[in-house]
Image (spheres, helix red, strand yellow):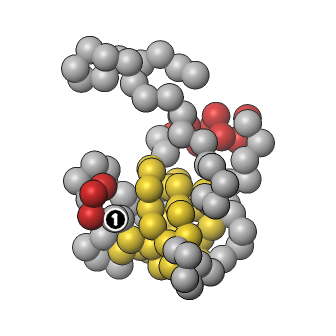
Amino acid sequence: MYNRKNKNGGEAPQLVLPQSGQIVGVVIKSLGATKFDVFCSDKKVRRCAIPGRLKRRFWIKENDLVLVTPWPVQGDEKGDVVWRYSIMDRDLLKKKGFEIPK
């Protein structure tokens, strides 16, 4: 979508769109370590964690837009944060028709 150079001189990653089974959400509260309360676009609040393989990849704070994968068990209550969107990504998601929770 947009051509940005990253620190190493390569192209920046393209916009990550939600796949089937993934939901866009907004972090409403940080619970410490890698746990967060996330208000998702399906109007549910999930307790989400950053999986171990992604812990050092991104820094998440309150009001960040994230991509959530609900757990197979307790999927209405818990999930994993698999991506954090930037401010520019938020606008692109709106243009593509994805619902962004308030």
Query: Which quadrant holds the C terminus?
Result: bottom right
Q: Which of 94 and 19 is in front in this view?
A: 19
Indicate the position of residue 9 as horizontal and vertical percent values.
26, 14
Query: Which quadrant holds the N terminus?
Result: top right
**What residue sits 54% from the left and 34% below the top?**
15
Whether residue 99 is situated above or below residue 72 in the rendered picture: above
Res. 86 visible in picture: yes
Residue 101, picture quadrant: bottom right
**What residue sits 51% from the left and 79% below the top?**
78
Indicate the position of residue 21 as horizontal and vertical percent values.
64, 61
Q: What residue type is labelled 1?
A: Pro
Q: Nearer the viewer, residue 11 or 52?
A: 52
Pointer 1: what residue?
A: 51
Q: Which of 101 and 82 is in front in this view?
A: 82
Q: Is the residue marked by circle 1 packed among few (<14), some (14-19), or many (20+) residues within 10 Å?
A: some
Indicate the position of residue 25 as horizontal and vertical percent values.
58, 61
In the picture as drawn, the residue positioned furthest to the right comes out as 97
Res. 37 visible in picture: no
Residue 22, picture quadrant: bottom right
Q: Is mark 1 on a helix, strand or loop?
A: loop
Indicate the position of residue 38 as horizontal and vertical percent values.
52, 70
Whether residue 89 is situated above or below residue 60 in the rendered picture: above
